[in-house]
Image (cartoon, grey):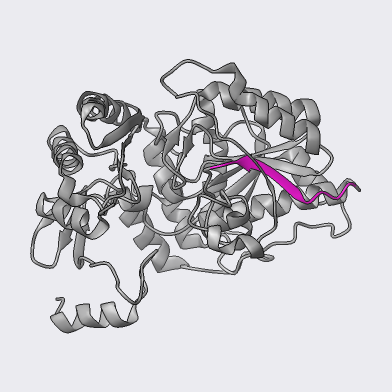
Amino acid sequence: MFSPQDLEFDRRHIWHPYTSMINPLPVYPVVRSEGVYLEIADGRRLVDGMSSWWCAQHGYNHPELVAAAKRQLDTMPHVMFGGITHEPAIRLCNSLRGFLPQSLECIFLADSGSVAVEVSLKMALQYWHAKGDPRTKFLTLERGYHGDTFGAMSVCDPKNSMHSLYSRFLPEHIFVAAPKSRFDGEWLADDIEAFQTALETHRHEIAAVILEPVVQGAGGMRIYHPEYLRQVRTLCDQYGILLILDEIATGFGRTGKMFACEHADISPDIICIGKALTGGMMTLSATAVTRKVAETVCSGEAGVFMHGPTFMGNPLACAVAEANMRILARNEWQAQVSAIEAHFRDTLMPLRNLENVADVRVVGAIGVVETRRPVDMAAMQAFFVKQGVWIRPFGRLVYLMPPYIVDAEQLRQLTDAVAVAVADTTLFAVS
């Protein structure tokens, strides 16, 4: 049980994500998770609207995932992947081949989303080095977000992201304006012009294009038209440039498709997946590539791909992820996500008319309310806890990504709380 001393120790000594050690935001002690609920130390149960940063798509303590973890713990929790293979990795990768675009045949297992992005960037660089045409630049979108490690940070928006502090220390890449065409609106033909111009101008420098398909996540929760992806794929083919899609946040059903690139009916050369891969049980990611990319990477001077995390192919994580693939294969997620999307459209879209609201965006099991002023994080978080929900806003974004198993009453509790919060001017930062 938590004591005041525990929380004081936490405040003094434990650094939480994106939090100051001088004046840390309050934290809420969680003692149990079950289904869509987080239970805090005082006994209150909160409906989780975040899926633990978008990864627990089936909720918490799912019996099939828990059983898979227990079975694997009894046999082999971990073993190095160098020179060794094991059934959980083979079964997982075989299952992934059935979900991923057919052309993505070769799978590199890693241990976090950021590392999957690092792997994809290194693969692209090594690909061109092996071809005798070394390239050092990546083309990407403003307002994008790809992770917190240095390579990943270098392809995040250098001016408007949380990583702008590090801009002088990061490699400089090529950024173009993010598309303005809304997912639910008309395609604006001039959206692709800046991208096309940059590709033409820098085509001999660019190793790959990297972007988040359809949904730009932590960079602003923007949802754009699939036609942009289709045209990007066409232009990459025209100029012989690799296309990397970061599906870490969007993969495994979150947008209403198994992968967001399916909205545009395209396939990348390299894809990064993570977050929901294990159903939120533990960390695991993967980078999958075409046979052509894999063989080219390995045909160069090194003869191998130069990367190998210590916990690569962790059997425990692989076993849980493979169990998650079996849950997804039942296709229950499709009806679940469709119901969430319908509820969000009915309840969140009308909030556009509120004075404090600048925009509302919905796709699949993602609902975003963009406010005109930044929220007061501590005040709004405390308000949500009093309402019996766990919602973690940031900046001017109050958003929901609940577990797919959320029911109508729980959804209503989440969206009602959002509606009251964004109408309350006391929950916003002072201008």
Q: Residue at x 61, y 20 (%)?
A: 190
Residue furthest to the front in view is 431
Image location (x, y in percent) of residue 177? 59, 35
Q: Quadrant of residue 404?
A: top left
**Magenta residues?**
133-142
Q: Is residue 408 left or right of residue 266?
A: left
**Between 225 and 253, which is closer to the camera in this rendering?**
225
Q: Residue at x 53, y 58 (%)?
A: 163
Q: Residue at x 24, y 49 (%)?
A: 391
**Between 211 and 283, which is closer to the camera in this rendering?**
211
Above/below status of 250 relative to 126: above
Image location (x, y in percent) of residue 153? 58, 56
Q: Quadrant of residue 417?
A: top left
**Between 353 and 221, which is closer to the camera in this rendering?**
353
Above/below status of 414 relative to 43: above
Total numbered labels placed on residues in the image: 0
Q: Residue at x 31, y 31 (%)?
A: 360
Asked whether 82 falls inside the magenta stretch, the response is no
